Amino acid sequence: MRVLIIIAIIASTLSQVEHYIQTAHQAQELCGTVAVEPDDVVVDNDDEYAERYKELIGEWNLYMASLDGEIQFFDEDSDFSESLVFYSDYTVDLIEYSGGRKTLDMTMDVVYDDIYVSFICDDSSILPSSIAYEEYMILGGIEDGDMTVALLFYDEDDFIEGSYSLFFRKA
């Protein structure tokens, strides 16, 4: 009986390690697919952050996404559209349309943690049950009116369950 209990504990531990390794590989793949220039992200003081944040203010429209390794393009004729509207009070509206209907309109606080700018959606009424929260992380700087956003999905244990790369263009 003790042997069975020990085997069960080892199997459980190996399963958790496998999940951790899988999550680490997903994060590594995400970092490998999106070029991040640290000089574009690191901000030495709050004044510099405020100056860089000014570039974000306004409306941004999704034009391309890498979803599970597949590239999708979006334009005004697409069935789905997503916009981010950044405001001077460090908030952002996430607005989604599907089939011509507004399916999401959510306001979130934009935060800066000495490495990157992000905002978090943790509204359990709109997220799948396996996802505790989504983090939208702005990668790099704004290049020619384009912005890259990593969308990371986390479970209740703060493990990354998956990720997408989203590409926005300033309206």
Image (cartoon, rainbow, N blue to C red):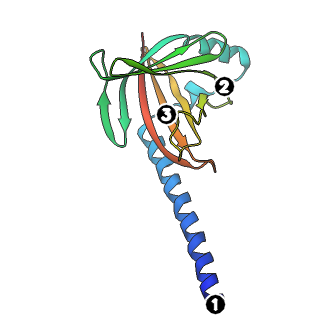
Q: Residue at x 55, y 12 (%)?
A: 55
Q: Across the whole image, how many numbered discs are drawn on residues? A: 3
The span from disc 2 to disc 1 (Cα, nearest Å) is 52 Å
Q: Kindly identify the amino acid type of the residue bearing the numbered disc 1.
A: Met
Q: Secondary structure at mark 3?
A: strand
Q: Residue at x 58, y 64 (%)?
A: 16
Other-residue count near label 2 (Cα within 10 Å), few / some / many at <14 / 14–19 / ≥20: some
- Looking at the rendered image, the disc whose residue lies closer to the viewer, 3 or 1, is 1
> In this figure, which residue is indicated by the disc labeled 3?
150
> In this figure, which residue is indicated by the disc labeled 1?
1
The span from disc 2 to disc 3 (Cα, nearest Å) is 15 Å
| Marks 2 & 3, CB-CB < 8 Å contact | no
As rendered, which of 11 and 125 lies closer to the eye?
125
Residue 70, percent from left and from top: 31, 39
- Relative to 79, is 22 on the left or the right? right
As rendered, which of 24 and 75 lies closer to the eye?
75
Instruction: Report the quarter where the N terminus lies.
Output: bottom right
Q: Secondary structure at mark 2?
A: strand
